[in-house]
Amino acid sequence: MKVLEHGPELKVRLNEIFYSLQGEGRYAGIPAVFVRFQGCMFRCAWCDTRRAQDPDSAPIVATVKETAAQLKRWGCKDIVITGGEPTLQMAALESLVIYLWQRGYRVHIETNGLKLITRATIRLCECINVSPKLEPGKFAINYYADTIRHYMEFDCVDFKFVVTNWRDVKRVREMQKTYEIPSQRIYLMPEGDGVASKSIKVAYDACRRYGHRLSARLQCAYKFY
């Protein structure tokens, strides 16, 4: 087993740090500072932060300690670690969570759920939004078997799915049935921006029908650097 090196001097590859409103999950609408990690293993067509995909083109490289120092300017205790995909820099992610938790911050993580965040780290988090992918062929339901069961153990974890049409909703329902995910822990995010998106009606109707939650991208509306 590979042993990860941790500590406040560990380097983190970042895309941006900004202040906005949490736009996803059970804490949607609260003020939060976003720390966007650089690099992702996916190339989703609907991704709203494609500039954060390439792990080798990070505009910011800082230590865990330096990253935490930048957060003080907003005086906000809720920190959302997002991406890209934060778990591609697992040691840096866990080190940052520990460092922030020790200083009284409430840490939220957004991840696609393919990699396992340790139980010890999860217990330090206020909330984790896991967003499995639904595309057919490449990402079958059983692809997430071990990770979803792992994250299901924790009440602070919710599951977010991007939906475009009722076929996507059907896949969500299949995944829900397979892993016995409670409806109230499932958030549906319509693909595309704004209420004009056709997919928002699908997500809205599915939430009313099945008792899921609707999730928007409030953090993309306004950013303060």
Image: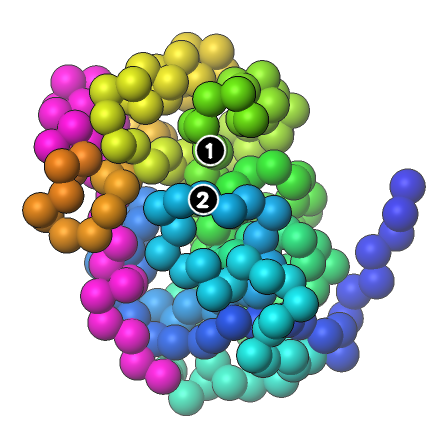
Residue 23 image position (x, y, % from top left): 28, 55
Give amino acid for label 1: Lys
Corner quadrant of residue 176: top left
Q: Alpha carbon of mark 2 to alpha carbon of mark 1: how far? A: 9 Å
- How many numbered discs? 2
**Mark 1 sits on what residue?**
133
- Marks 2 and 1: CB-CB under 8 Å? yes
Q: Quadrant of the N terminus?
A: top right
Residue at image position (14%, 52%) is 194
Q: Which mark is residue 68?
A: none
Nearer to us of marks 2 and 1 is: 2
Corner quadrant of residue 5: bottom right
In front of the other: 127 or 189: 189
Residue 16 image position (x, y, % from top left): 47, 74
Looking at the image, residue 181 sits to the left or right of residue 61; the answer is left
**Mark 2 sits on what residue?**
44
Asked if residue 81 can be seen in this view, the reply is: no
Residue 21 image position (x, y, % from top left): 27, 65
Q: Is residue 59 above or below residue 101?
A: below
Q: Is residue 203 above or below residue 111?
A: above
Q: Which numbered disc flags the more N-terminal residue, 2 or 1? A: 2
Which range is magenta?
201-225
